[in-house]
Image (cartoon, rainbow, N blue to C red):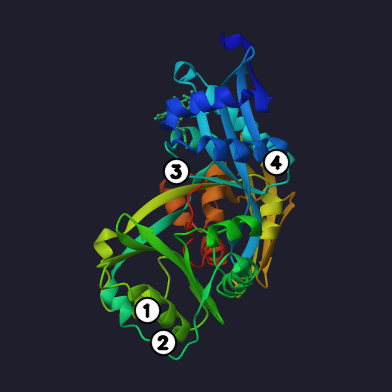
Amino acid sequence: MADDLRLVDVRSEHLDDVLRVRSRSFGLLDAGSREGWVADAEVFIADGRMVGVADGDELVAAARFWPFQQWWGGRKVAMSGVAGVVVAPEYRGRGVGSKLMRGVLARSVEQGYPLSGLYPATTVIYRHLGYEFGGGRYRYTFPAAELRSLGGKEVEVRRAGAADAGRFLEVVEQLHAAGRISGPLVWPEAKVAEWLGEDNSFCYLAEDGFVVYGWASGRLRVEELVAGSEATARALWSVVGSGSSIATDVDAYMSPDDPAHLLVAKEAGKHAEIERWMLRVLDAPAAIAARGFAPGASLEVDLELDDSELATNTGRWHLSVSNGSGSLTPSTATRDSLRLGSRALSALYAGTPLASLRKAGLAWGSADADGAIETAFGGATPYMLDYF
Ligand SMILES: CC(C)(COP(=O)(O)OP(=O)(O)OC[C@H]1O[C@@H](n2cnc3c(N)ncnc32)[C@H](O)[C@@H]1OP(=O)(O)O)[C@@H](O)C(=O)NCCC(=O)NCCS
């Protein structure tokens, strides 16, 4: 059986097999959602973003990736967002998942993604392949009455919906670039319009901000709130807080650095929840060229990368950073330099301090430039708002 296992592109006729493996992995799809799942899968198939492992004619494992962009240092970087990684129970524990994920990595590289990201149900398989924690999806809880009293009444706020998807994307783009934000995903405009048009999406737009919130299990939940000024932040949070007569608490997906933490007098902080996501640098020079760096940082340093999965990253490199941009070019320098494997490179890209990587046994060699490197890659804490 195992000898015949091969990587394949998932095709429409495989979808019954994928659903069978998926049910055994994540539970049955809700009644009525099969049609939507198949429609989505057909898009992944058409774009070559769904790969599988077959044993003879039968598909025994599958995974797909979303064509995301992700903000890094205030710039958008193409990122393959891996999801639905499933192996049939009778095939687990013998390398099928690793074979599948190698197929996902290869296809993501072929399609030109410098980065890949995922929410791990188990970290071991992904760490073996070079992924490392990149950030979290943070959910905080605020007393609704606190939000209600934030004020901002002078700011004009109007109800919004699917037709405002373009404006929504423009506002995010401006604010994330200006704030040199790292982590959030950019969804295609059609998906944003679908989301804003849902019955449970209550959207309000201001000149320099918006909020999308809804009900979840009898509580109010903020899916996204951005504001370009203190007054707008106050106004939008107090729209949500106006529900305090019914909802005692408001849950919110947001950055740990969000100014709301500084505006609200009391935060139900003990309820904060974090789901961690992992990042993988697939194409080191392209990933470095695409992200933003700390604007004041200036760096000229040699690096030695060892990537056992993606050989094109392996070798000696020169990293330059100035005026908020970086480049990674081949180097012939032979002096002792910072040495990183693929997990460490991915973690460093996401701003993990080199001191942590060294203490975890993931970075070695010259520490002369550690401080300057950390400054260049540092900035706001990477966060995501969406699960995928
Ligand atoms: C997780 C899953 C995809 C792994 O597939 P697999 O074919 O068993 O993986 P592999 O045999 O290639 O294992 C690769 C490594 O991951 C480890 N691993 C796999 N599943 C693991 C688990 N549940 N817990 C801890 N380690 C695990 C293996 O031990 C191996 O590491 P090792 O070489 O150091 O021993 C599979 O178990 C599955 O489909 N699970 C249910 C759905 C799921 O959780 N999907 C992941 C969503 S992010």
Please name the amino acid that badge 4 sits on: Val
Please name the amino acid that badge 3 sits on: Gly
Q: Quick one: 198 or 83, which is closer to the camera? A: 198
Question: Marks 4/3: CA distance?
Answer: 27 Å
Secondary structure beneath label 3: loop
Question: Marks 3/1: CA distance?
Answer: 47 Å
Residue 188 visible? The answer is no
**For residue 271, above or below residue 298:** above
> In which quadrant is the N terminus drawn?
top right
Determine whether label 2 and label 3 are within 8 Å by CB: no
Secondary structure beneath label 1: helix
- Indicate if the residue with disc 2 has its beta carbon within 8 Å of ligand 1: no
Mark 3: give few (<14), some (14-19) or many (20+) Cα within 10 Å.
Answer: few
In the image, what residue occupies the spot 51% across and 74% down?
210
Mark 4: give few (<14), some (14-19) or many (20+) Cα within 10 Å.
Answer: some
Residue indicated by mark 3: 361
Q: Quick one: 160 or 229, which is closer to the camera? A: 160
Q: Say which of marks 2 and 4 sits in front.
A: 2
Question: Marks 4/1: CA distance?
Answer: 45 Å
Horizontal side of 94 relative to 273 (left or right) equals right
Residue indicated by mark 4: 109
